[in-house]
Amino acid sequence: MPKQQGIKIIAENRKAYHDYFIDERYECGIVLSGTEVKSLRAGKINLRDSYVMVKNGEIFLIGVNISPYDHGNRFNLDPMRTRKLLMHKKEIIRLFSKVKLDGLTLVPTKCYFKDGRVKFEIGLARGKKNYDKRDTEALKQAKRDIDRAIKSRNRG
């Protein structure tokens, strides 16, 4: 069977973009079982309310729900278990120092297949205040109104 090429997005964490300013993004691999990969191919993942934690020089994904595979029987694992992410040691140390010193947090923003392997995109994030969220929403609404006005003007 030929190796799959390109990127196929499985899930995006839109809530992360609503709740945080994403400053930097990093790609990392993940340690999964076979039935979890099959479940991901079916798109059964929920990234909402999940986060990334650095512990003992390793990086872990917490709060991600990968639903059990339908035909997995006894090989299915706990859907909410903590999963280890795979990154270079230097990157983990750099992220850990930014999280500790700057008060930032790590959140998963995207899950996708890249050349047949499951990858996660994690973002170094700063929290938004309520007024920041309102400003972002107001800008989106203004852009929608402008686009709508231009479209109706071009029609008529």
Image (cartoon, rainbow, N blue to C red):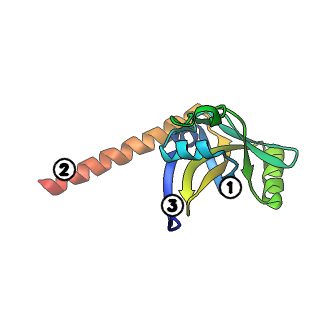
Label 1 vs label 2: CA separation?
Answer: 44 Å
Residue at the location (62% across, 51% down)? Answer: 120
Q: Residues within 10 Å of mark 2 (few under 14, many from 20)?
A: few
Question: SS class of the residue under badge 3?
Answer: strand
| Residue marked by disc 2 | 152
Of tags 3 and 2, the one toward the viewer is 3
Q: Tag 2: residue type? A: Ser
* Mark sitting earlier along the chain (1/3): 3
* Mark sitting earlier along the chain (1/2): 1
| Residue marked by disc 3 | 7
Residue at the location (37% across, 44% down)? Answer: 142
Q: Tag 3: residue type? A: Ile
**Disc number for residue 28:** 1
Callout 1–callout 2 Cβ contact below 8 Å:
no
Residue 151 image point, x, y percent: 22, 53
Question: SS class of the residue under badge 2?
Answer: helix
